[in-house]
Image (tube, grey):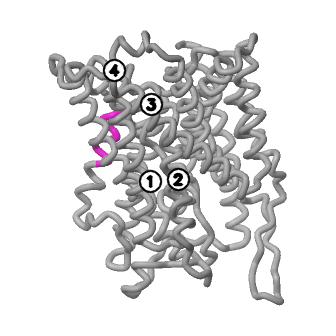
Amino acid sequence: MKEMRLLFLFLILSCFLVNSTSLTKTVVNKNKNKKIETLKFSPSSKNENEKYSTNDATPKKDTEFLSSVALVAGTTVGAGILALPDVSKSVGFVYSSGVIFSSWVYMLLTSLLIAEVNLNLVKQSKSGNEQGILAMTQNVLGNKAAIASGALYCFIHYALLTAYISEGGGILNSLFNLNNAKFGPLLFITIFGGIMASEKNSLIEAVNFIFTSIVLLSFVLLVFSGATSINLENLIHLPTFNIKNIINLVPVTLVSLVFHNIVPNIVARAQYDRKKIVKTLVVGSAIPMAMFIVWNGVILGMGSSIDSANSSIIKLLLNLFSEAAIVTSFIGFVIGLRSFFVDLLKEKNDVISNASKGKQVIQSKTPSLLYYLLILVVPTILALFNPDIFVPALDYAGKFGISLLFCAIPAVLALKSRNIAGDSYVYLVQDKANIIALTVLVLAIATVFI
């Protein structure tokens, strides 16, 4: 554990220094060009409050909605679900189900706050370009807050990608009976890291959809296969109420239900349409929440009988479900971290005028390969040389990273943006008294210290 803390502190410090240098350069360049812009809001019509688009494209088809839902669900269903039954044993099915549902409501609200701020920022920007978490924080709260959120963002993504590579590689070792424990993680990162580095959107979406389908199919088969072995007494039994055990469950549920890194991407996919954004986030996150409760019920209901399953099919299904869940989450977190580095290195981009079409084209000087080296090298090294890193990575990411970056900061962003905007602000969370945002902020801070 001591080595883990030192490694993660090193990551945070590195991200802090990189962010500080980058943001300083950005501010200097902006000062030279005298193009510093403050967050301003102009009055909007009722129709604009419902929908805002950065281009004249026609509305997306239902397949785009399904693809976005699959991306949210796939990003959410990751390594966290594999740890839920273990941490739920001392709490029991009834109490743990209540914690999972409450955590889902909480995480849905925080994702809507991120989408709300993102929608309003893009709506008011002149370029209309997609804005990631770092850009949002910098625009609303300033450079120091952006540096802190950037460090947290790196920490969460590196921690969870490390967990995914470690556990995903371990499952591959089990499936293919690989002799060397390091072969599995290397095989995992070669296949799925290579797919992400190809930057072929059609391929990435196809892989994500296929593995999301595998998650759903293997999940259904697991539920039906294990249903006959469920002992109802295991489900209705209420252990002695212990608030400490329930509190200890919260960080894992937060990790299990996080998808917030891709919210800006979802907002853009929905063409900045208010109703589409809300519908996508609600449906996309509700599917994993329901799966988690059912999954918990099956595993806890089977109890010790799961170890004496009379068929190897259940073990195979468990491996397939686990690997597919990790792959879909891996894809979402790589997309999120790439968006972060695009924001971070944005001063490396050239704006090229296109007079014939009256548009400006952003052409990046940063090689795509550099992004994926930044994203994948560190977690791969940690996974290879720290085989027991899975649980500590989840714990650190949930308690410290996610509760601050994806819960506390979105609440602060919303409170500040609403105060500046006044009546022209577009609400995704109907919270004009700011009660919900303030409650989210208090709970997020409390999570860090419990």
Residue 330, given in percent of the width and then of the height, sits at 61, 39
Q: Amino acid at mark 2?
A: Ala
Above or below for 363 versus 50: above
Rendered position, 34 above or below 168: below
Give the prevailing secondary structure in the magenta stretch: helix
- Quadrant, the C terminus: top left
Label 2 belongs to which residue? 70
**Closest to the observer, 153 or 106:** 106
Label 1 to label 2: alpha-carbon separation: 7 Å
* Relative depth, front residue between 155 and 245: 245
In the picture, the disc for residue 284 is 1
Judge left or right: residue 180 versus residue 274: right
- The residue indicated by pointer 3 is 222
Tag 4's secondary structure?
Answer: loop
Disc nearer the start of the sequence (1/2): 2
Q: Earlier in the sequence, mark 1 or mark 4?
A: 4
